[in-house]
């Protein structure tokens, strides 16, 4: 199947009912491997703060960090569609600040689009970015940058009023010009209803089986952290165990003078 190369390909995939595969990645080596697969697109998420930097939330992530990681992902996957996350407070102060930050990200990284969290409060921001020819991905449901406001990493949209608000926000983001919408940790039926209602595709993470596509963080699906086991996650490998075993074997062979071997030395 042809890989997604522009925003129109997302709408085409939805029209053809072809599920979209998205992966969150932050580094050159993994990006190179992803580029060898048929995965549709890469998100350079502000989750880098937790997955790579060891922060307890995404809040400390800066524009400079997003630029750095997006740039190196682009080098690893030069021909893939790449979306860069907008970190906390990079689009909250003013439209002018947002345009300035997004301009830097697009110019310095080669990203194809940016993603921001939130609904109706950020419609003017989305409109301004689209007007400036910067493609925008929306994000509703569990929005990690609002973790203190939400009171934790919990499913969003179970109550009737919150369900209604999320549906309205989804419509507003689409009308504002977003070409894609991420739905995180929402009830499956709500995600299905939003997906059916919108013309733009939805990408789910913990949003059930009826979104137009799915996204997972690469270190999560590879099982790099054996203590992280949310319900929505499927681990396709146990890299934590494999890496730990390899490192332990390396240590033992160094101590036993088994490594380096004859074939590892220069004459």
Image (cartoon, rainbow, N blue to C red):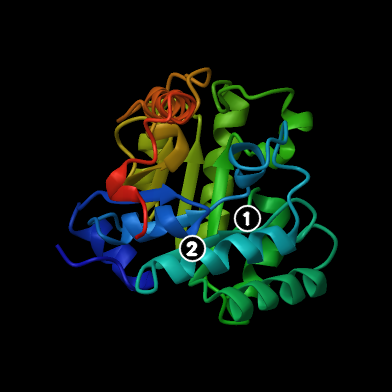
Q: Residue at x 64, y 73 (%)?
A: 129
Quick one: which residue is furthest to the right in this view?
A: 93
Q: Is residue 146 placed above or below 64 in the rendered structure?
A: above
**Tag on residue 63?**
none
Q: Is residue 98 placed above or below 238 in the rendered structure?
A: below
Residue position marked by numbered label 1 in the rendering? 116
Instruction: Say which of 238 and 156 sits in front.
Output: 238
Distance CA(mark 1)–CA(mark 2) = 19 Å
Q: Quadrant of the C terminus?
A: bottom left
Q: Quadrant of residue 242?
A: top left
Q: Quadrant of residue 256?
A: top left
Residue 7 appears at what percent x and percent y? 39, 70
Q: Is residue 114 placed above or below 39 in the rendered structure?
A: below
Residue 140 appears at what percent x and percent y? 57, 43
Quick one: which residue is furthest to the left in this view?
A: 1
Can the viewer see residue 66 in this picture?
Answer: yes
Determine the secondary structure under disc 1. Answer: loop
Residue 230 appears at what percent x and percent y? 48, 20
Q: Residue at x 43, y 42 (%)?
A: 218
Instruction: Say which of 119 and 38 sits in front.
Output: 38
Instruction: Say which of 244 and 61 sits in front.
Output: 244
Image label count: 2
Can the viewer see residue 217 in this picture?
Answer: no
Determine the secondary structure under disc 2. Answer: helix
Q: Residues within 10 Å of mark 1 (few under 14, many from 20)?
A: many
Q: Residue at x 56, y 28 (%)?
A: 157
Q: Residue at x 35, y 27 (%)?
A: 235
1 or 2: tag closer to the N-terminus: 2
Q: Residues within 10 Å of mark 2 (few under 14, many from 20)?
A: many
Residue 173 appears at what percent x and percent y? 56, 57
**Tag on residue 73?**
2
């Amino acid at each position: 199947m042809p890989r997604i190369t522009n925003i129109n390909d997302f709408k085409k995939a939805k029209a053809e009912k072809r599920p979209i595969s998205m992966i969150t990645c932050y580094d050159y080596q993994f990006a190179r491997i992803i580029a060898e697969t048929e995965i549709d697109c890469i998100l350079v998420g502000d989750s880098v703060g937790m997955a790579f930097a060891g922060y307890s939330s995404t809040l400390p992530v800066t524009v400079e960090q997003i630029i750095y990681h997006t740039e190196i992902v682009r080098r690893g996957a030069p021909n893939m569609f790449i979306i860069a996350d907008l970190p906390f407070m990079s689009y909250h102060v003013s439209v002018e600040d947002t345009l300035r930050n997004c301009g830097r990200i697009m110019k310095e990284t080669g990203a194809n689009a940016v993603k921001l969290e939130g609904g109706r409060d950020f419609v003017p921001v989305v409109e301004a970015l689209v007007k400036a020819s910067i493609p925008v991905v929306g994000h509703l449901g569990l929005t990690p940058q609002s973790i203190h406001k939400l009171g934790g990493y919990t499913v969003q949209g179970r109550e009737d009023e919150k369900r209604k608000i999320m549906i309205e926000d989804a419509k507003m983001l689409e009308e504002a010009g977003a070409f894609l919408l991420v739905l995180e940790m929402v009830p499956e039926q709500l995600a299905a209803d939003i997906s059916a209602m919108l013309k733009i595709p939805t990408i789910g993470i913990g949003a059930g089986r009826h979104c137009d596509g799915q996204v997972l963080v690469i270190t999560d699906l590879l099982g790099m952290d054996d203590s992280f086991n949310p319900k929505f996650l499927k681990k396709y490998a146990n890299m934590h165990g494999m890496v730990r075993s390899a490192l332990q074997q390396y240590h033992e062979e160094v101590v036993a003078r088994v490594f380096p071997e004859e074939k590892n030395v220069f004459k």
